[in-house]
């Protein structure tokens, strides 16, 4: 299915891979750590990630994304890049500004409605070099649990997007970089950096 989402909200799960939590010096949370990204951060496949002047360190974070269908059900899954101004995240001690710049959520290339999300390889490359190589089976909280948990807090509407967390290996992006997130069975999300 082609990607055409118009989310009312984008709900993200932080520190959902133990190795990623460790690489940033954090503990694994006892329950899902949620935060929001604005829909204005969305960027289509092939779009350009713009590094804002407020940040000196912009990181890639390849992720599996859940797309919500009718009545809070799961429509399908796609690739995402939870781009993060890491220096601002550390400075602010919370996630909103660091995650919310325009172009900070590449999403796509399609919505797969048939894939089993529980053990998918997820690989992020920068300029052809593998930076992240994980599996969704390494998540602390799986997709079904995440959807149920978020639904107990807020109503999920058709088109809403959930980012499920990133494996270890996050790192910085520079102008001119080509960043690619691939998930087996879903496809390849490719974006350049300015």
Image (cartoon, helix red, strand yellow):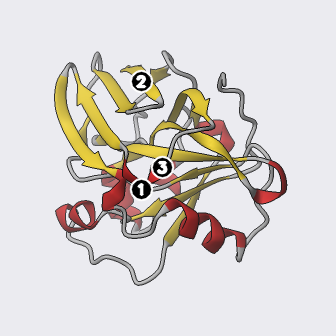
Q: Left of 160 or right of it: where is 144? A: left
Q: Left of 164 or right of it: where is 70? A: right
Mark sitting earlier along the chain (1/3): 3
* Residue positioned most to the right: 71
Mark sitting earlier along the chain (3/2): 3
Would you say residue 137 is visible in this rendering? yes
The residue lying at 74 percent from left, 55 percent from top is 73
Disc number lying in front (1 or 3): 3
**Residue 29 percent location from the top left of the image:** 38, 79
Kindly state the secondary structure of the residue where label 3 is placed.
Answer: helix
Disc number lying in front (3 or 2): 3
Real-space Cα distance between discs 2 and 1?
A: 17 Å
The residue lying at 67 percent from left, 42 percent from top is 39
- Circle 1 is placed at which residue position? 165
Mark sitting earlier along the chain (2/1): 1
Disc number lying in front (2 or 1): 2
The residue lying at 27 percent from left, 66 percent from top is 21
Q: Are marks 1 and 3 in contact (CB under 8 Å)?
A: no
């Amino acid at each position: 299915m082609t990607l055409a989402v118009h989310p009312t909200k984008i709900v993200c799960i932080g520190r959902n891979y133990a190795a990623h939590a460790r690489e940033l010096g954090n503990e694994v949370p006892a329950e899902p750590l949620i935060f929001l990204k604005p829909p204005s951060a969305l960027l289509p496949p092939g779009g350009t990630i713009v590094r804002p002047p407020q940040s000196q360190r912009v990181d890639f974070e390849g992720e599996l994304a859940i797309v919500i269908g009718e009545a809070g059900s799961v429509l399908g899954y796609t690739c995402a890049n939870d781009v993060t101004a890491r220096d601002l995240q550390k400075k602010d001690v919370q996630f909103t500004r660091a995650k919310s710049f325009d172009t900070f959520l590449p999403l796509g290339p399609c919505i797969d409605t048939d894939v089993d999300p529980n053990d998918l390889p997820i690989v992020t490359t920068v300029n052809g070099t593998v930076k992240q190589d994980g599996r969704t089976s390494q998540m602390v909280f799986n997709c079904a649990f995440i959807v149920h948990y978020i639904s107990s807090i807020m109503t999920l509407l058709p088109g809403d997007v959930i980012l499920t967390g990133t494996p270890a290996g996050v790192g910085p992006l520079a102008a001119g970089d080509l960043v690619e997130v691939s998930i087996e069975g879903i496809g390849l999300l490719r974006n350049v950096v300015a």
